[in-house]
Amino acid sequence: MKLQIEKWVDKVRPFDANAEDLFQEAVICYKVGAYKSAFLMSYLAFKTTIKNRIVNCQYRPDSYHGKEEEWQSNILSILSNDDKWESHLNKIIDGDPDPQSTSTTRAVIFFSNREEAKNEYTYWKNVRNKCAHAKKGTIDSSTVECFWSYIHDNMSKFYVRGGREYLVERFLEYYKYRDIEEPSRKLLLINDINIVFKDSAQEFFSVFLGKFYGINRHLITSGNVEFWRGIVDSPYENIQEGFVRSIMPNSDYFISFYEHFPKILSLATSIERRFIKDSFSKWMETWFEYTGSNKNFWNILCVLLKNYPTEIDLNKIARLDLSIIENVEMNEEMLGILKNKRIFNKFVLGSGSYFFDVDFDSIRRNNGRREKEIISWFEYVEWDKELIFAMNKAFRDLNRSIDALKKSMYGSWEYDRKKIYCELLVTYRERIDPAVIEELDLDDEFKALIIEGES
């Protein structure tokens, strides 16, 4: 039966290959009750991993920037010496953190809480010395288990330049080479981020996204969805929340990610209940300023209407250009939600109000594409009193204009607009409630089109 620490190591892979072999030997010793051996092998796996992280580092910390010869002599040559590397690693961990220092044991690992990290590291170094030199002190199962807990919580802090800076750069590097990287490397990085940025994952992702966007102008595409899924669906609440917090202030970020991961909206509202009213609703009102698709707009609007109807201003949203409906297919559930709130009527009478302005200048400004794009909206509207009243008034005013122009060579635009009205009424007359027709004082020709289908 596997221990919890074994399951964690299998999943996260915190050790490099050589160190992992050492750790597996430690587990074997632990299971047979050889606790001193288990501790020593675990400790060696821990120290070996830190050493290899430094030796294999492809960049240089500030304290050695532009000083490659010193890096080789002060760090690499000694860490490559089998007899000296362990004691020298202790000196490096305890080294001077001042980048301007001329000490031969300048720090290359920087901790957010240096004293605490050094004290914990020194404690386990002393335990190791007691164990290795047969000094007084009990080394039992609890000692090993406590050290494993220390590894679990602190392994991610031991990187060149310190965990925080390293992890941003390493995560960017992982993204660049994600097609050839081992998937376990991503899990390890996310685990490390969760630990190092325990209370400030938002800080990590804000920095990461800023650098990411500087390199990749499209944050999320069909080709990198799986990369982001590992973050959004992370098993760590801290990672999920930190990521969502980092994109909440930026409309383009949030809307782009929502299209692929709708769950971020519920996460955002659980973080800040006012998010929809203060931010998201306003983004919907100015949708075309962002990168969202028409399909995404309607999906979001349906979610808002279903779950947060009192927190959005539909009258302002319905001022968007009518092209918002282009290339969108709506299922029955969506149509039910939208029609229940008379969204299509609000758009037609709001953004499409020009369609009911029939003076010469208005028709001249809005003929052509704008006349055609509103036609599709009538497939979805409710033919209620407000809509019929608006169309009847326009129809009546249009007839007056046409009558006045009968003896002139003008009027073709007016005739074209009337033809559109007539075709709409004939097409959808079956959807108009007879009671509404009787209740309103309608133009005779207008009424005949509804009742008889002809003028």
Image (cartoon, rainbow, N blue to C red):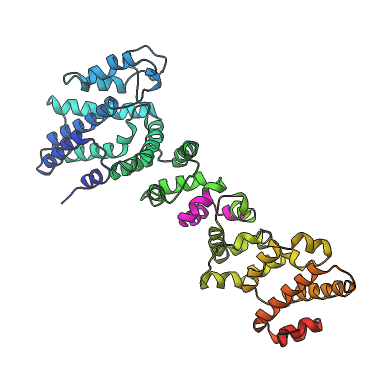
Indicate the position of residue 361 as horizontal and vertical percent values. 82, 61
Q: Main secondary structure of the magenta part?
A: helix
Assess whether residue 258 is covered by the magenta stretch. yes
Q: Tell me: 125 left or right of 205.
A: left
Depth order, front residue of 321/402: 402
Q: Is residue 276 above or below residue 189?
A: below
Q: Quadrant of residue 359?
A: bottom right
The reply to whether residue 418 is visible in this rendering is yes
Q: Tell me: 411 left or right of 121.
A: right
Q: Is residue 449 above or below residue 137?
A: below
Indicate the position of residue 377 as horizontal and vertical percent values. 64, 69
Assess whether residue 256 is covered by the magenta stretch. yes
Q: Residue furthest front?
A: 409
Q: Residue drawn at (56%, 59%), measured in percent from left and top?
A: 294
The reply to whether residue 248 is visible in this rendering is no
Indicate the position of residue 334 as horizontal and vertical percent values. 54, 69
Q: Residue drawn at (49%, 54%), measured in percent from left and top?
A: 258
Depth order, front residue of 35/373: 373
Q: Residue furthest top?
A: 102
- Magenta segment boundaries in residue numbering: 254-278
Q: Quadrant of residue 409?
A: bottom right
Q: Quadrant of the C terminus?
A: bottom right
Indicate the position of residue 398 as horizontal and vertical percent values. 82, 72
